[in-house]
Amino acid sequence: MIDRALKQLLKGIYARTRYNMNWLPNTPLDIGDIGLFQDNVFEKRRALALEESGLVESKCTELAIDFTSGAEIGVVTKASADAPGLAVVADGSVRITFGSQGGVMVKIRGNKIKSVVDFSKLKGQLLHLKRHHQFDRADTIVTEVIVAEVTSVLLASEKDAGIVLAAKSGMPLDDLWRPEAAACVSVRNAKGMACQIVSERNLVPLYKCHGLRRRFWSNEEDVLRVTRSSDGLPEEEGDLDLFEVEPV
């Protein structure tokens, strides 16, 4: 059940953002990392220093990402007496409950993006590695990462799981996941949780990666198209293209 929930989470995040999710996001991951993408999870083997090659740019974004598994998640606070009906943390706690095993809540805020800007040069470097048996057919390389100022990931391992967060009294619920509130939020207690990352700073929850594969000729026999590259590469290399990896 958890495996199915993780698969749904990874595919749901990709469908919404066009990024793969780093599960778990506290696992170190950086642009230029080379490894295998198996079962929708990236496993690092080695790294290529892309930033030193001038192929990477960084920029900040206000992108906010929210993902939940649906209506089976409940968030309960005690309404403040001077703000009835509003989601305000009055007693310093927020209770989040999950009505089913595999329930998921993800909150990502305050992001910096590092990305490859010259894929032609990247392809050349990967072909060079391939000639020296340092980039295999199954290998992929991380080409973009989102470094989040604050990341929260909650995953229930059983039905009726729940977690209680301690928060600043009087804080609006919408502010709970903001970067400036991270120091005021902590886990008070939890039950039946497979993962409870709450307001962790500077994690890498999202990334993109690419691999090399042959071009295909679209006919009824699905025959490989073999052409000599204009840059003088051998035929088998000139027929390789970069492709973006996505969850399946």
Image: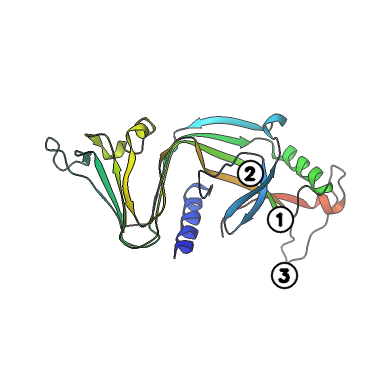
Q: Which residue is mark 2?
A: 142
Q: Amino acid at mark 1?
A: Ala
**How many neighbours does mark 1 have within 10 angstroms: few (below 14), some (14-19), or many (20 or more)?**
few
Sequence order check: which comes first, mark 3 or mark 2? 2
Can you identify the residue that label 3 sits on? 220
Residue wearing tag 1? 138
Mark 3 crowdedness (10 Å alpha carbons): few <14, some 14-19, many ≥20: few
- Give coordinates of residue 154: x percent, y percent: 39, 50
Q: How far from the left and from the top, in percent, is residue 136?
A: 76, 52
Q: Nearer the viewer, residue 27 or 125?
A: 27
The residue under the point 62% across, 52% down is 245
Q: Residue furthest left?
A: 81
Label 3 or label 2, whichever lies nearer to me, is 2
Taking the spot 50% from the left edge, 54% from the top edge, the residue there is: 10
On screen, residue 69 above or below 202: below
Q: Label 3 to label 1, Cα distance in Å?
A: 26 Å
